[in-house]
Image (cartoon, rainbow, N blue to C red):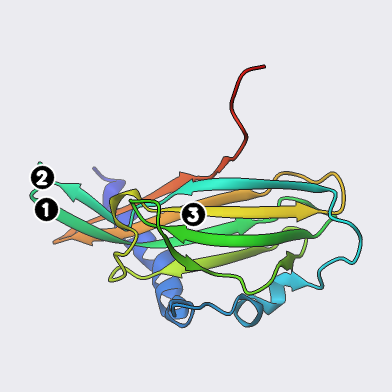
């Protein structure tokens, strides 16, 4: 219990700056080029010979108390370029609701993320369009072998004096079938 008294204030102190900065990114059409200009580099002119994708579960709402209470969460999707040397081209970031309907598309054109840099999408607590089964699809590419990106969703929310934060890791999308 002793440690728990320090976790909530620490978490609050870490998240408050994000909450103050992120509302500008919460518009329905995020201009990633402007919001993350420091994380971006020109898209390579060479052929993008390596590509992949991620499915990222997200939860803008969660049913609690035997389904009688709904708690809404803000969602921050982060795409981290894990390469120390090569740009990561992000080709698509799309947000889907529980029924699989696309709610939002966040890129007008592909963007290139500098080595070890990150871009993020923020969905505020009051945007519950995704519902309990929301998810993102992130498609990426590179000019050659590259460390696989790290794609995660951070959900933060609370009810009364209880606050919750959890992470959902992206899963690479691969075709499953017979060999």
Q: Residue at x 71, y 50 (%)?
A: 82
- Report the residue marked by disc 1: 69
Q: Residues within 10 Å of mark 1 (few under 14, many from 20)?
A: few
Local crowd size for mark 2, using a 10 Å CA cut-off: few (<14), some (14–19), many (≥20): few
Extreme top residue here? 179
Dots 2, 1 in contact, CB < 8 A:
yes
Q: CA distance from mark 3 to mark 1?
A: 25 Å
Give how far across and how far down residue 7 sits, in percent: 34, 53
Which residue is tagged 3?
136
Task: Give the total number of marks visible in the rendering.
Answer: 3
Residue 90 screen position, x and y as percent: 68, 61
Residue at 83%, 56% (x, y): give it: 86
Viewer-nearest residue: 160 or 124 = 124
As helix, strand or loop, the secondary structure at mark 3 comes to: strand
Query: Which residue in the structure is indicated by mark 2?
Result: 65
Q: Residue at x 69, y 78 (%)?
A: 37
Against 109, is 60 above or below? above
Horizontal side, residue 107 vs residue 110: left or right: left
């Amino acid at each position: 219990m002793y440690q728990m008294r320090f976790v909530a204030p620490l978490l609050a102190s870490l998240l408050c700056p994000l909450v103050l900065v992120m509302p500008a990114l919460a518009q329905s059409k995020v201009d990633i080029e402007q919001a993350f200009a420091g994380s971006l580099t020109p898209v390579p002119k060479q052929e993008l010979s390596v590509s992949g994708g991620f499915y990222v579960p997200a939860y803008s709402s969660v049913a609690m108390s035997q389904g009688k209470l709904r708690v809404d969460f803000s969602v921050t999707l982060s795409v981290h370029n894990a390469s120390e040397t090569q740009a990561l081209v992000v080709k698509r970031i799309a947000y889907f609701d529980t029924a699989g309907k696309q709610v939002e598309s966040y890129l007008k054109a592909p963007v290139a993320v500098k080595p070890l840099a990150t871009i993020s999408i923020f969905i505020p607590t009051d945007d519950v369009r995704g519902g309990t089964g929301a998810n993102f699809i992130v498609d990426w590419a590179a000019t050659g072998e590259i460390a696989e990106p790290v794609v995660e969703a951070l959900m933060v929310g609370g009810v009364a004096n209880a606050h919750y934060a959890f992470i959902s890791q992206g899963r690479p999308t691969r075709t499953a079938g017979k060999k």
